[in-house]
Image (spheres, rainbow, N blue to C red):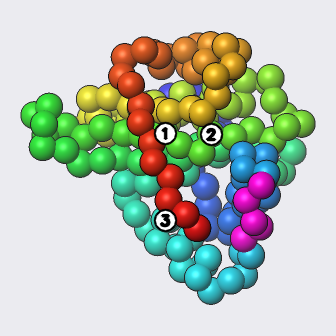
Amino acid sequence: MLNNDQVRLIQEHELQGLLHLYKYLQPDDSELNPADVQIISLWREMLDDPKMKIIVLEQDGQIVSSCVLVLVNNLTRAGRPYAIIENVVTHELYRRRGYGAQVIKEAIHIAEQSNCYKVMLMTSSKREETLRFYEECGLEKGKKTGFIKYFGG
């Protein structure tokens, strides 16, 4: 879809770069060690999952924007899957350049090509600028009401 060879699926050797980018998504999270055996195992499991796509945009030799697309099998809508976009983040020094929009649009494209009947994204942001950004990516607000429950840990 995109004529930008910088937008692509993540590669196995890029775990450390992704973890660095995630500092801009959840700055209060404790830092994960990319050499930790459990983290490596989780990483490989994620990469091997055909229903999970980690989309990245590389600029200046580093991952500067990313989102995760998860395809979910479904027994409604004639058995068509649906998709969820999560963990949308752009490095703070690379914002307002369209990189976030590119990874989201690629996720939407993959969902459509995977015969999904819809793709959903939730945001905790209430900022009008953020909501408008997602609308400009082709997503509609106000169609559903989201609920969430967090668990400790």
Which residue, given by chain and number where applicable, does mark 3 sit on?
Answer: 46
Q: What residue type is labelled 3?
A: Met
Dots 2, 1 in contact, CB < 8 A? yes
Horizontal and vertical percent position of residue 51: 37, 54
The three-letter code of the residue at mark 1 reads: Ile
Q: Residue 85 carries which label?
A: 1
Q: Nearer the viewer, residue 10 or 39?
A: 39
Q: Quadrant of residue 91?
A: top right
Helix, strand or loop for the magenta stretch, by majority: loop
Spot occupied by residue 38 in the image (x, y as percentages of width and height) = 58, 82
- Please give the range of residues in magenta: 28-32
Residue that appears at 64% across and 22% down = 126
Q: Do the residues labelled 3 and 1 touch (CB within 8 Å)?
A: no
At a point 13% along the width and 36% down the height, the residue shown is 76
Q: What residue type is labelled 2?
A: Val
> What is the distance, in whole Å, between disc 3 and disc 2 at their CAs?
17 Å
Kindly identify which numbered label has been placed on residue 2.
Answer: none
**Is label 3 in a helix, a strand or a loop?**
helix
> Which residue does the image show at 58% across and 67% down from the upper left?
153
Q: What percent of the width, then of the height, locates residue 28? A: 77, 55
Q: Where is residue 90 in the image (x, y as percent from the top left)?
A: 74, 38
Report which residue position mark 2 lands on: 88
**Which residue is depicted at the point 72% across and 24% down?**
98
Q: Is residue 52 left or right of residue 114?
A: right
Sequence order check: which comes first, mark 3 or mark 2?
3
Left or right for 137, reference 100? left
Label 1 environment density (alpha carbons within 10 Å; few <14, some 14–19, many ≥20): many
Can residue 6 be seen here? The reply is no
Q: Residues within 10 Å of mark 3 (few under 14, many from 20)?
A: some
